[in-house]
Amino acid sequence: MKRLILPIAVFTIIAAAVFPATAQPKKRPPRKTREALIFLLKGSPVESDVVPVLVPVTRRVAANAPLAGAMKSLLEGALESDEPDIHGFIFGLKFISAQIKNRTARIDFEYDRADLEEGEEFSWGATMRSFFPDGVERTALQFDGVDRVVVCVEGLESYDSPDDFYHRKCPTKWWTK
């Protein structure tokens, strides 16, 4: 036992010198952000007597990747701080990527199957299907260098069921007209 006391004492002294109790954790530099608009639904997408419209809502996104940040915010939908009649309109999608080439942005999404129960299928209804590509396009067109937008879900220019085969494949050379 006496043999262990000296090595333990030396280890403790060295550890205290290397890792002082007053050491402060390194602070990360503040993350640079900027404002971006995302376009969400105002009005009810369910009630037939209220016609929904797309409205701009301000969000803070990473300054180094504002298009990707805006698309992620678009999928997150409305916040408690938004007006009460502002609605997010997409559930069951994941953002994959945003690329810009020759002034054309390609925005890729895929279905988030983890949210589905066995045997359940995606069904957004006509309102969601018609407003989603417009919301993505309006959100993307605000950024410098974007004049055209291609929206792809599971590699298809489609916004309905992933099992529906009446869809165009997203172009491989999406930046050409």
Image (tube, rainbow, N blue to C red):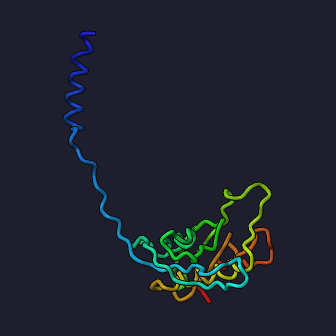
Q: Residue at 62%, 81% (x, y): give it.
A: 43
Q: Nearer the viewer, residue 142 or 147?
A: 142
Q: Residue furthest top?
A: 1
Quadrant of the image occupied by residue 107: bottom right
Residue 161 placement, left or right of 93: right
- Figure disc tally: 0
Where, quadrant-wise, is the C terminus in this rendering?
Answer: bottom right
Q: Residue at 74%, 55% (x, y): give it.
A: 117
Q: Residue at 62%, 84% (x, y): give it.
A: 134
Q: Nearer the viewer, residue 171 or 131?
A: 131
Residue 84 placement, left or right of 52: left
Residue 8 percent coordinates (x, y)? 25, 21
Q: Nearer the viewer, residue 3 or 92?
A: 92
Residue 63 placement, left or right of 138: left
**In the image, residue 14 above or below residue 88:** above
Residue 147 percent coordinates (x, y)? 53, 89
Residue 75 percent coordinates (x, y)? 57, 70
| Residue 157 visible in the picture | no
| Residue 73 visible in the picture | yes
Where, quadrant-wise, is the N terminus in this rendering?
Answer: top left
**In the image, residue 50 above or below residue 15:** below
**In the image, residue 154 above or below residue 133:** above
Q: Residue at 21%, 17% (x, y): give it.
A: 6
Residue 160 placement, left or right of 105: right
Quadrant of the image occupied by residue 155: bottom right
